[in-house]
Amino acid sequence: MNDNEVNSKYDRQMRLWSSAGQKRLAGSAVCVIEANAVACETVKNLVLAGVGRIVLVDSERVSEEDLATNFFVVAEDTDKLRGECAAKHLGELNPDSAVLHEKTLFESLLTDPSFWSQFDCVVNCRLDPCVCLIDLLWDLSVPLLHVHSIGLYSLVRLYCEERTMVETHSSRADDLRIDAVWDELQEYVDSVDEARLAQVPYCVLLIKVYQKFMREHGRRPSTKEARQRLAQLGDGENVEEAIKKAALVTKRSSELSEELAKLMQEKVDLSTASSFWILVEALKQFYKKHGVLPLSGSLPDMASNTEEYLKLQGIYRAKHETDKEEFTKLALQLSSQHNRAADQIAQSGIELFVKNCSVLEVHRGSKKVWSSDMLSESNPVLQNTNIYFGFLALNTFYKEHKRHAAQKDQSEVRALAISELCRWETLKSFPDGLELVLDELLRAEGTALHNVCALTGGIASQEIIKILTNQYVSFDNCLTFDGVRGQTGSWKIE
Amino acid sequence: MATILSRAGPFTDPDYTPEFGLKSLATSKVLVLGAGGLGCEILKNLVLSGFRHIECIDMDTIETSNLNRQFLFRSADVGKSKAIVACEFVSKRLARQGLTILPHFCKIQDFDDDFYSQFSIIVCGLDSIEARRWINEKLVSLAATMGHIIPWIDGGTEGFQGSVKLMIPTITACFECYMKLVPVQTTYPLCTLASTPRLPEHCIEWAHELEWPKRYSDVDFDPDIPEHVDLMYQLAKERASQFGIEGVTKAKTLGVVKNIIPAIASTNAVIAAACCNECFKFVTSCAENMRDSMYYNGETGVVCVSDPYDKAADCAVCASLPQEYVIEEGCTLAQFVAGATQNFGLQQPLFFTAEGDLYNSKKPDAFVTDIPVVKLIPFADRVANLQINIVDSSRPSTLKLSNGLYLTVLREVVLCLVDLWLDGVRASSPVGWADLTVDLGELEGLQKSQGLLNVSTNRQIVDGDLSQNTLRVNQENTSKGNTLLLNQNTIVSGESVVSISKQWDVDLAQSTVGTCNIGPSQQRVFGIGGSKQDLAVLVSKLLGCLGVGNDLGWADEGESQWDECEQHPLALELFKGDFLEHTVDDGGLLEGWSWLLNLSDHDESKLSCKNVSRSWKKFQDVPHPFILTLWGTELARKSLLT
């Protein structure tokens, strides 16, 4: 954040996703299908956040129902084009954001891939997940969100082939390397004599204790053993901190998180994959050679005097720089080996990658609307998958009857649900609680409650912002909100 | 809305009628506190939910940095009253028959009991903890003194996270009961600021706390005056360059001196909508309400769970007041037990003191009951504030005895565990008993841990700085020292909400139970049992969090280790670095911690955290005895962990 941005209208959000994230939002374009309440509530949050361009695809006219649930159409708009009215009112929220209306029929747009490829993200707010749209956007690699709400329930589903997340904002990035000290750090640790022990950060104490114990016993100390030794070093603030953090001596610097280990084993065609995978390959090579990842270089605050802390900080940063340099060379080499343009890998990208290399995340999506293990008994969010399944059943009903299912259609909807379930051949018995969920959905007869729309729009917009800024970790990849219990449940459709 | 209300659903109160729902909606009077990020959303949501009579209080004026989320305001409104602009905007946009929205541009403290009494329900989107504590006290006192119960729903956000609490004064937990979830605000030691700064924040705080008052003693610093902020920034920058510290920026300076909390539109939308959804359900009875408290986190994936939350037995605002209970001289144990049982409506109480069990109604034969009670409580006649604890399934309350003894009825959570202990799932022992109580005392985060500690027979408080929640308990009567170290933590009840303010550091080692009675070969097993009885409790709590943790997808490291040390089996060690910090509340800095444990066994084979939490989820619905039985054997422990 530069000085001009301080206290600007984006101040409070740039403290989360920084200027870089804000710039990406400003340069993004999002398409939203249908201008109903849940869509407008989603768009509202995108406009406020400063997303550059938003296009509403809608060909309905403003109805009574819209007036009852949607803040962005007014009484005078009755019978006018809904998308146009909503775009006007939403656009007023922020001059930095252009909200446009596209009145071409959604169905006709489906035959025009060039229309869809202009967007960084598409949001479908209809009841129908629309399989052709899913296929179309999947092939165009445009992330698609399906968002809908009926009565007290709602669903959000992300269709996206691959999400590679570097800036995960994980709190786990600190890495002190107690058991993998390099020359410069060793030199510094050795230079700290008895007299200076009280002034140095706890990390130095841990290294000393660790190394002495290793020399004497040929194995790493347990936390308890480390504590016993630390306790003999006096009662300074740094010793106290060291005792609290003693368990760090048991942490293996060479150990990779499960996700990262898995990630490194993935087979990717490096001549075509995104530059992220070149960096992962470079990381793999670096790790193979050194047995540890490149150092992130960040050091937590530790009680000590200024001079010693800054010295230590300097040593960690220098190591980070050296590691980064080596890593960069590896990455560039790989890049040219696979005949890729060198400019695909920006220096700033490498810096971010190295800083976050221990906390990378990759989500692989699925085009499936449904997976067979969702209603199994081991599913921890059964109530929430029931809701999702309810939406699918209502959609089937709607397609057949061209109207929303109501309470009188109870038996038919149940029968529909059962036949759907049988199609997936996983049905042992009607899932617990599904009947109640279907009944609650039928009660609303396709109508929406504003609160549930607003909540769902909040969640959807947040996930869209994560996608657009490529920061933080997205949900993966399906969730429903249960407005009766006040809970979401999220699971992955493989 | 009309469609939903026109018929009952499967989760509707059986007595529900559409007439009732619609009429309640049309006649209820709702008070909205705050017209900021949450308030704007709340006003919109309430009108679109069908509420017709709304009033709104906010003392603030509109600032530029509000515009990224407070969508009822435009640049031209900067400087005007939030309450007035927001209410006017909503009235105009959503003009409906019979709709009145009345703004109040003032403090909530400016109104009296009569004002508040006119409302059916209050929805609160305030950003200050102090203001919420004030309204909480007001509402609890209205309920307690005038029998006028006004339910209220409180929302709070910070960055990607937020929480919603549904509170019915005197009936459910009040805002004060939740206060133990609020962590101490990060402060920097003065000596760090004055002589050993290391971070840019240290330099800024130095300028703010120490240098400004010295240099500009006649000017009060005001973060809303740009010149002041610039000056402060210069001071901090000079300080930093003097020490060679990098990273002091204007944004950081303002962040520190103004204690800026990141805020985004999407989180506000989620939290405000959840508040209004509960308000709508509550007023119309169209569906059941969520449990007491909802927690939302959108930082990693999307997590939104609602949990029950118990009233704090020691809540300064809503806990029942101490009652007089007279033990007459010569009153025998039997008479005391009978009297207390009847007086407090106890069912199967266990009474115990610092010396061990006083009376256990499940094992009546083990106690001599014709001795005067005071003889059974050492120093009862001389020392005030000793405690008799009662464990029973009756509701939590604190009772005062005329001779200065307090009876503390422990909370129900404790109770199930203890009950089953007494049921003989494991051989009872006063020592183990005490351990259990102490652990739970800590785990429950009760401020009266002091009292609970007294229960311990063989333990001595080595260091009990309760204000810091630092506690060291040493086991004296065992050959191997047993040290329980609970550092600066506060764990709060509610099966799944756990908050640790600074550091969670537990080292549980040597077993305390049964070692003298059995041979060495068995000792280990039993030792494990003994030690694990502590662990069981701890782990049960930890897993309680894990259950949530898993739901939340916070599959993060958080490491715990089972160390095999010489004579004894297990040490559970957790350390902070790997815990995820979750900050829940707006302005108030509600902080929760969550973590997933990697429990590694002796052979260091890694066990998946996800499995642990899943097992726990399954066990949650099973009566507690089952769980402890499980923990009673090594095999069971494994089955739990694998």
Image (cartoon, coloured by chain):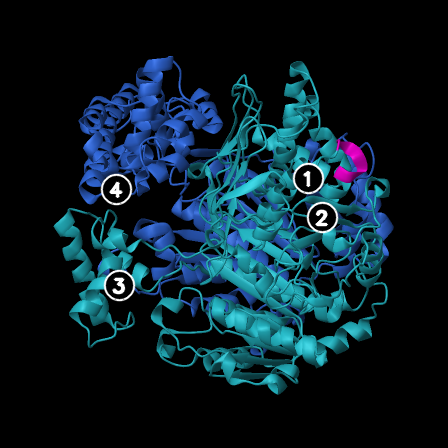
Chain colours: A blue, B cyan
Secondary structure type for disc 4: loop
* Relative vertical location of residue B333 with respect to residue B532 in this rendering, above or below: below
Asked if the residue under mark 4 is in contact with the one under mark 2, i.e. CB atoms within 8 Å, the reply is no
* Relative vertical location of residue A312 with respect to residue B416 in this rendering, above or below: above
Asked if the residue under mark 2 is in contact with the one under mark 3, i.e. CB atoms within 8 Å, the reply is no
Residue type at numbered disc 3: Glu
Query: How far from the left and from the top, in percent, is residue A88?
Result: 47, 69
Q: CA distance from mark 4 to mark 1?
A: 42 Å
Q: Are marks 3 and 2 on the same chain?
A: yes
Q: Which mark is residue A304?
A: 4
**Which residue is identified by label 1?**
B433
Q: Is residue A489 left or right of residue B597?
A: right
Q: Is residue B362 left or right of residue A125?
A: right
**Which residue is identified by label 2?**
B352
Q: Earlier in the sequence, mark 1 or mark 2?
A: 2
* Relative vertical location of residue A460 with respect to residue A280 in this rendering, above or below: below
Give the label, 1 or 2, closer to the camera. 2
Q: Assign the C terminus of chain A to one quadrant of the image.
A: top right
Name the dominant secondary structure of the magenta segment: helix
Residue type at numbered disc 4: Ser
Asked if the residue under mark 2 is in contact with the one under mark 1, i.e. CB atoms within 8 Å, the reply is yes
Q: Chain of mark 1?
A: B
Q: Are marks 3 and 1 on the same chain?
A: yes
Q: Chain of mark 2?
A: B
Q: CA distance from mark 2 to mark 4?
A: 47 Å
Query: How far from the left and from the top, in percent, is residue B330?
Result: 79, 59
**Which residue is identified by label 3?**
B209
Label 4, residues with CA under 10 Å away: few <14, some 14-19, many ≥20: many
Q: Are marks 4 and 1 on the same chain?
A: no
